[in-house]
Structures are given as structure tokens and as C-alpha cells.
Image (cartoon, grey):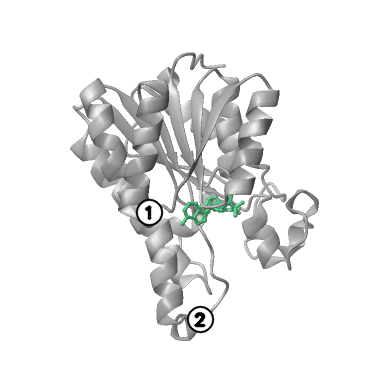
Amino acid sequence: MNGFDGKTAVVTGAASGIGRASAQRLAAEGANVVVADVDADGGEETVDLIADAGGDATFVEVDVSNLESVERMVDVAVDTYGSLDFAHNNAGILTGFDEVTDIEEDQWDRLLDINLKGVWACLKAELPVMEEQGSGAIVNTASEAGLVGMGGLANYSASKHGVVGLTKTVALEYATRGVRVNAIAPGPTKTNIQSGMAGGSDPSTLPFDTSAMADVPMDRHADPEEMAGAVAFLCSEAASYITGHTLPVDGGQAAD
Ligand code: NAD
């Protein structure tokens, strides 16, 4: 355990999946957590799960594609808990599998607005607070599709390559300003995004071969908690000399 007592974390996309697991993990390690999502019911459920486990969390409704909404989210974190030490910029969507010429303009715009502009908006709102404090650690959620091309995922892959580039660039800009900026690149993880691809079944019971990204050397899906462990590590003092890095958490996929 990393000992995050007294620290404050914001996690976007925390109403389910990887974001929920990350919020639960950071809270279990002692951080106060702002659970941020467009999905209020799921977000409140995450807050209840954290409270039931003895942690402290607050829900904020946010649309990460809207800068004003993201600025409000950061204000709530600072007003409620007095600081912003960690941010997991994680909210993201997949609009389906389509060849590049079949992607509609609104599909392209919606996905890029949430997956890429959303991370930029979070960084823009979070960084000034962290710089003023003189410390902070940010983890963005990219994807294996941000490291290699994946057929049928042109808009998703473009957005996640963008997240990797944004992570490197902002890490350089803030390298001497007390803020570390990294990313995780999850492989196929048992969440609604994967079950959506498999027709909407319960993500915890997903058969592995339904994944469009099933070429994983470890031959299984990840559990969301395995992403949360990497996020906690990148936020922790154990990662104090790591910035600008995208960490594949992918059962060996990136090594193949
Ligand atoms: P998920 O669908 O369970 O979680 C995504 C969350 O983001 C949801 O709670 C959703 O309500 C929220 N969200 C969507 N649009 C939003 C918006 N505009 N503002 C705020 N919140 C919004 O799926 P997940 O797999 O946990 O996804 C989390 C992240 O992990 C995403 O960025 C996704 O691209 C990435 N990822 C997932 C996988 C996978 O296999 N599950 C693999 C690689 C990367």
C-alpha cells in the first residue's frame, strides 16, 4: 500500500469499469476521491461502495468534453478536500467497429471530443492547481490502440494515440514544475466497453474469445482492478522518477 492518507484524487469515468476500480483503490489507500462521470446513478453507486469500505468519496456530475463542466469538477475537489494531488483522466467511449470510410462525422467528433479533448480539458483544469501546490501526479487512460493500429477502430485509435502524445508533451512541459504525467495502456479489460462489443453481457462473465483484441499472450482479459494497481503505482512515490511514460497493462500484448 502506498499511503495516500490526506491526499485528494479525481477520477473521471468512475461510474463503472476501470475508473470505478481506480477510485476504489485510491480510496482504499487513504485518498479522498472525487468520483466524476456523466452517469450519476453509477457514480453514486461508486461513492456508496467506497463509503461501505470505510473510504471518503464525493460524486460530481461531469461531461469531460465540456471545459466548463471539467473546471467545476476541479473546483469541487479543491473546495471539498482542500487540494488536488492525483488525477486519473480515464473517461472514454468506443463507438463501434467501422472501417474508416464508414465512420460518420458525428461519430468521429463525439469520440474525439470525449476521449481526446476530454483529457486535454482535464489537464487544463488540473495542472494550475497542482503547479501552485508544487506537486501532483496525473495518469491518463490510453489503450493498446494508442500504441498500435487496430482495424475497425480508426477514431478510437487516433484518440488514444493522441492521449499518448498529449501525455508525453505535457510531461515535458511540467517536468520541473512538480507534476508528473503518465498514462496506462490497458489491454482488453472486463468492463462495459468490452461487453458492449460482445452484445451487452455482464462484463465479469465475458468469454475471452468475444474480444476483438483477443491476441493477448496471457490468454485472458484483465480485471479492472489490475488497471487500478498500475494507476496507484504511477501516482505513488515509488514512481517519483517516472514521467511521460505510457505503461502497457496488457498481459504482454505490446511485447508481441
Ligand atoms: P466503461 O464504459 O465501464 O467506463 C467508461 C466510463 O466513462 C463510464 O462510466 C461512462 O459513463 C464514462 N463517460 C463516458 N462519456 C463521458 C463523458 N463525456 N464525461 C464523463 N464520463 C463519461 O469502460 P472502461 O473500459 O472502464 O473505460 C475506461 C477507459 O479505459 C476508457 O478511456 C477506455 O477507452 C479505456 N480502455 C478500456 C479498455 C477495455 O478493454 N475495457 C481497453 C483499453 C482502454
Task: Kindly report which numbered mark, 2 or 1, lies closer to the viewer in this rendering.
Answer: 1
Give the structural element (helix, strand or loop) at label 1: helix
Q: Position of residue 147 (x, y in %)?
A: 43, 56
Q: Which residue is mark 2?
A: 99
> Relative to 175, does residue 66 appear above or below in the rendering?
below
Disc 2 and disc 1 in contact, CB within 8 angstroms? no
Across the whole image, how many numbered discs are drawn on residues? 2
| Residue 126 in sight in this render | yes
Q: Position of residue 45 (x, y in %)?
A: 66, 39
> Relative to 204, does residue 31 appear above or below in the rendering?
above
Please name the residue shown 36% across and 46% down the image.
70
Q: Residues within 10 Å of mark 2 (few under 14, many from 20)?
A: few
CA separation in Å, label 2 and label 1: 24 Å
| Residue 158 in sight in this render | no
Q: Quadrant of the N terminus?
A: top right
Q: Which residue is mark 1?
A: 118
| Callout 1 amino acid | Gly
Q: Position of residue 100 (x, y in %)?
A: 45, 80
Please name the residue shown 60% across and 21% down the image.
55
Does residue 215 appear left or right of residue 78 in this picture?
A: right
For residue 157, which quarter of the picture? bottom left
| Callout 2 amino acid | Glu
- Going from the N terminus, do you reach mark 2 or mark 1 first? 2
Q: Nearer the viewer, residue 216 or 110?
A: 110
Residue 15 is marked as none
